[in-house]
Image: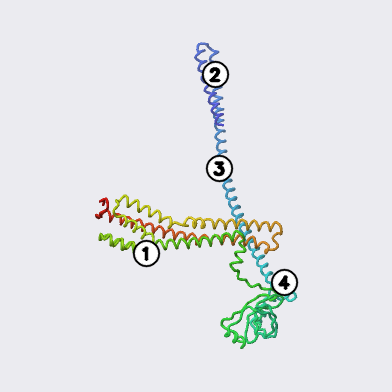
Amino acid sequence: MKNFTLRISAMVLTVLILFLNSANSFAASGPVVDDLQKAYQKEILFLMSYKKEIEKKLSEVQKDRASRLQAAKSEIHQLEEKLLSMQTQNELSKKRLSDLENESADKIDNQKALSGIVDQAALRFGKEALDKEGLNEQLTTAFSLSAQDLQSQTEYKWTEGEFFDGDGEKQTGKILSVGSIAKFAQKDGDMFSLYPAGDGHFKVWKKLPSGQAGQLKSSEVPEVLSAFVYEDASKEFQPKEEISFMKRAEAGGPIGAVIIGLGLLGLVLAGLRWKDLKLSYGSGSQLKQKLEVALDQGNFEEAKDLAEHQRGALGRLSRKLLQNLQKGRQSLEDLAGEVILKESQKLDRFSSLLVVFASVAPLLGLLGTVTGMIATFDTITEFGTGNPKLLSGGISEALVTTMFGLIVAVPILLVAQVLGSWGDRIKADMEQTAMMIINSVTGKKVSGDDGSL
């Protein structure tokens, strides 16, 4: 509408310009020009009135547009508030629905738990005892029967019966039943605790101390009672057997045997290296202190006597140097280096092998793990997973070899490090002693065959 008004205004201005131009051009034309001028004036008046009318309509349209826009904004604001309210109600409804679903699931879980209690009671007391309508009645009956059974389990009852001794021989004697959770047998004045052997039979678990046995015979309850508490006498209990080292070694297979052999060999090498270090060390610390005192006093003869009566690497190094006092410093240093190098070969013997054994042992254990798992999967492929005993061989090999690998690697590594530190300390003592002797000799005048210091 605004563009239209501008166009009308432009048209009016154009007409005025044309009129002025025509008036200037035909100023001398006479009456015809006057008529034309009047016609133009009428047209201009008409256009100006038409412009005012259009501007009035434009103002009305703009007011109507502003009013409708305000109404639309108000309606949009109301709709937004309504949408927000509906969204809030929707979220509250969802939360309420979620709470109801959780509450329903809890009730279902509680009902299942209560039904499980009823099922356990039915297994214990029989389905006929719980043949009631309604879960509440069944629970009431189950708790009542459980209370009676619990009370009966605290009663002592002596009967004549049979049991099996530790060798599997059937014996006859008095049986003391402590409710339905424990049994004891009396035979030749001794009492034994029993454990279920299957099908209602019982076998000797262990012999009771005399104090406990005496109290049980008198129907008294000992403060401490060695009893095997069972839940179902019809199920056989298998006592856990102590697995010997040989059985574990057999379970490890060939790789386990290799690891054990590696460990034994490493132990022998460690023992030999310890012996070499012990012989090389001798009484090195004492000799070092005595030599230091004698050399400080310039008493080389006493130092020679001390070195002559000492064994070990330090004694051999000291004798070699003190026997060649007439040589120069460079010669003594070369001689000391030669002796230290020769002794180092003895001190470092088997050190590399021990480190290799410590590194190889866990790798062999890992290899045994892989081969054991391969054997397990082969068994699963052939026989399935129905019988766990068929899988135990491969699993045992996988686990036992790993255990053996670590058992061998850790001690050997520790021993190798300790012996290596000991050897390094002996080398350090040899170097210090050699430097002490050379410095003492070259700092004193010692006449030789060639007159050198």
Kindly give the residue lying farthest to the front in the view shown. Answer: 449
User: For this rendering, which residue is in front, 328 or 447?
Assistant: 447
Q: Is residue 181 above or below residue 64?
A: below
Q: Which residue is mark 1?
A: 283
Q: Nearer the viewer, residue 2 or 287?
A: 287
The disc labelled 3 sits on which kind of residue? Gln
Closer to the observer: label 3 or label 4? 4
Please say if the residues under marks 4 and 1 sit with CB atoms less than 8 Å apart. no
CA distance separating discs 4 and 1: 92 Å
Q: Earlier in the sequence, mark 2 or mark 1?
A: 2
Please, is residue 22 above or below residue 429 in the view? above
Question: Can you give x and y, in whole percent of width and height, for residue 353 in the image?
Answer: 49, 56
Residue where numbered disc 4 is placed: 134
Gap between marks 4 and 2 measured at Cα? 113 Å
Q: Pick whichever of labels 1 and 3 is earlier in the sequence.
A: 3
- Please name the residue that numbered disc 2 is placed on: 38
Q: Is residue 393 left or right of residue 308?
A: right
Which one is in front in this view, the residue at disc 2 or the one at disc 1?
Answer: 1
Q: Give percent across and percent down for residue 290.
A: 31, 63
Mark 3, residue position? 70
